[in-house]
Amino acid sequence: MHMSSIATEIISLCAACGKEEGEDNKLKSCTACNMVKYCNRDCQIAHRPRHKHDCRTRAAEIRDETLFAQPPPNEDCPVCCYMLPPMQQTYQSCCGKMLCDGCIDAHHDTHCENFLDSNADITDEEVYPKCPFCRTLAPTSSQEEIKRLQKRSNMKDANAMCCLAIRYEKGSGVSRDVNKAIELWTKAAELGSIQASALLADAYNPYVRKKVDGVAKDMKKVFHYYEIAAKGGHCMARANLGVLEAGAGNMDSSRKHYMISAAQGNDNALMAIKAGYLDGHITKDDFAKALRAHKVAQDEMKSEHRTKAANKDKDACRCPNCRLNNFMVEG
């Protein structure tokens, strides 16, 4: 028996009036749930009482699906090609690259050894090391560093904006201006900087240890910016969401945030999971899973130079460049 194939076409109808979509009637989806379509705003308002419950339920499901999805991995250090660790990376104002502290420290050690072993007259280029990536001479003053950050900020470099905002927030090398810091962080966040989003959340968060004075606290903005940063792969923002959700009694959401953050190699999230296991909020299987995932992430980011840099006393070196850098940080 011959069976002929029948082509089927999905017909879109307005959820309120039932009118079919056509050339003269382009339907628009509900932006919150994407489950239904409407002819216009009037149809959407008329259908709202019947649709409201299903819409909110589906919108919450979509939010959770995106919020708890696997975040993107960290970028690699362009020098050693290992994944950048969350807390051991430094922005280079000369080339705009984020380098791991291990590569910076190894380059610093080589430079210092050559300098301290030399008894001959030396030039400025020999006193101050060059960028490990682009080989540009390091800034010789705090003001030069600020000029570089301002130049790259004008080029819409989000990381440069973020670093410059930190200086304005702390009053480091510039007059303290919290409003300017918030403005720069906001622009950087709009350009996609997850670090800027996390710092904005910290600024609005009344519960952080190092509070930003002069900023009105706003928990709605805290959750908004932490969630943006977490979805972008910021493990500390993710862990902070776990803290906030636990404080609100949402233990399941808190557990999910901690599990993701621990799998990114975050030590604080792993400690929170251990505490939750001891208190009975987290199962033994989840604790074991977090331990394994945390170790895998740590191994992927581990290197001999990074371990050395983390355990090193930076103030011990007395070469001119290190003394300058200590002054720049303090001033």
Image (cartoon, grey):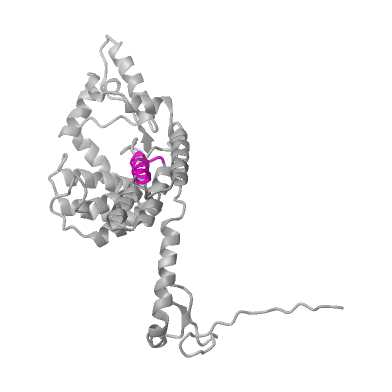
Residue at (38% x, 27% y) in the render: 307
Instruction: Determine whether 32 is above or below 226 in the image.
Output: below
Asked if the stretch drawn in magenta spans residue 277, the answer is yes
The image quarter in which residue 73 lies: top left
Residue at (44% x, 65% y) in the render: 62
Residue at (28% x, 47% y) in the render: 162
Instruction: Determine whether 249 is above or below 316 in the image.
Output: below
The image quarter in which residue 331 lies: top left
Number of numbered labels in the structure image: 0
Residue at (14% x, 43% y) in the render: 171
Observer able to see residue 27:
yes
Magenta-drawn segment: 265-278
**Is residue 244 found left or right of 55 in the rendered image?**
left
- The quarter in which the N terminus is drawn is bottom right
Observer able to see residue 154:
no
Q: Nearer the viewer, residue 188 or 93?
A: 188
Instruction: Determine whether 163 is above or below 70 in the image.
Output: above
